[in-house]
Image: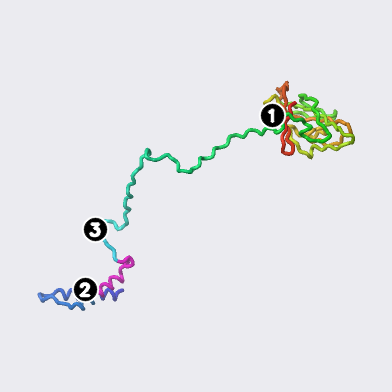
Amino acid sequence: MKNSRMKITAVLFAMALTLSGCGDAMFEMTAEEQSMIVNYSAQAVAKFNTYQQDGEVFVRPDVLDGEVSTETKQEPLPETEEIPEESLGTEEPAGAEEPAQTPGTPEPAQPENTGATMTQALDLGVVSADYTGHELTKSYMAEDYYAVDAETGKQFLVLKYNLVNTSGQPLHVDILAMTPSFTAVINGDQSVPAQTTILLNDLSTYQSDIEAGGTAETVLLFQVPEDISDVSGIQLNVTMNGKQFAINL
């Protein structure tokens, strides 16, 4: 780098001596000599020019004078013309589908067979299921050795059914394997499911043999509010093998 600077200095010094003098006439160079000096000077400047990779660029005079910072200034973005809301159309594109409406609360499924009987619902063949009545009680006693007590503020609605073997031979009845479900609608407004108990005579879990012509007494227990003193109407809904039956008692 020192050699290059010395060469540049020598060239400039030579030019100064050539162009200046003590009243002597200006030294005239040939075109070839001028070309050599220009080429050499250009190469020397290009070698130490850190912006050489940018090529030939335009620099404003005021930047060279230091009046404007060399940092790039951000030009203001052109203003966009606001569109009045009144001019915006409200029509939807053709073929646009309307949003799906949120479905409301589904209505409870209605029994398929209204006015059926327990015999039809359970489909026990030659064994019929006959309704014999109901009662309200705080505690249900089974055969004087086992009792089921209702919860505080509740009482049992006991529905009584007799299973009658109408055939001439003993039959094994297994309602537990059939997995039916029972729901009672009391006085038209209170719906309660049947209680699952370990009673041997619980109709929903009954498993036993019935002699030919014999009868087995069974029950269904429903917990209802204790303030119910009168049952004016009972609809017993039975679900069996995916089918629903409504039995009016």
> Does the rendering let one see residue 183?
no
> Mark 1 Cα within 10 Å, few/some/many (few <14, many 20+)?
some
Secondary structure under tag 3 reads helix
Task: Decide whether residue 51 is among the magenta residues.
Answer: yes
- Give the quadrant of the N terminus: bottom left
The three-letter code of the residue at mark 3 reads Asp
Nearest to the eye among marks 3 and 2: give it.
Answer: 3
Is residue 244 toward the left or the right of residue 172 in the image? Answer: left
Local crowd at mark 2 within 10 Å, few (<14), some, or many (≥20)?
A: some
Q: Secondary structure at mark 1?
A: strand
Residue stretch in magenta: 38-55
**Vertical relation: 10 (above or below) 189:** below
Q: Main secondary structure of the magenta part?
A: helix
- Disc 3 versus disc 1: distance between alpha carbons? 93 Å
Residue in the foreground of this view, choosing between 88 and 3 = 88
Q: Which residue is mark 1?
A: 191
> Which residue, given by chain and number where applicable, does mark 2 sit on?
12
Q: Which residue is mark 3?
A: 62
Nearer-N-terminus badge (1/2): 2
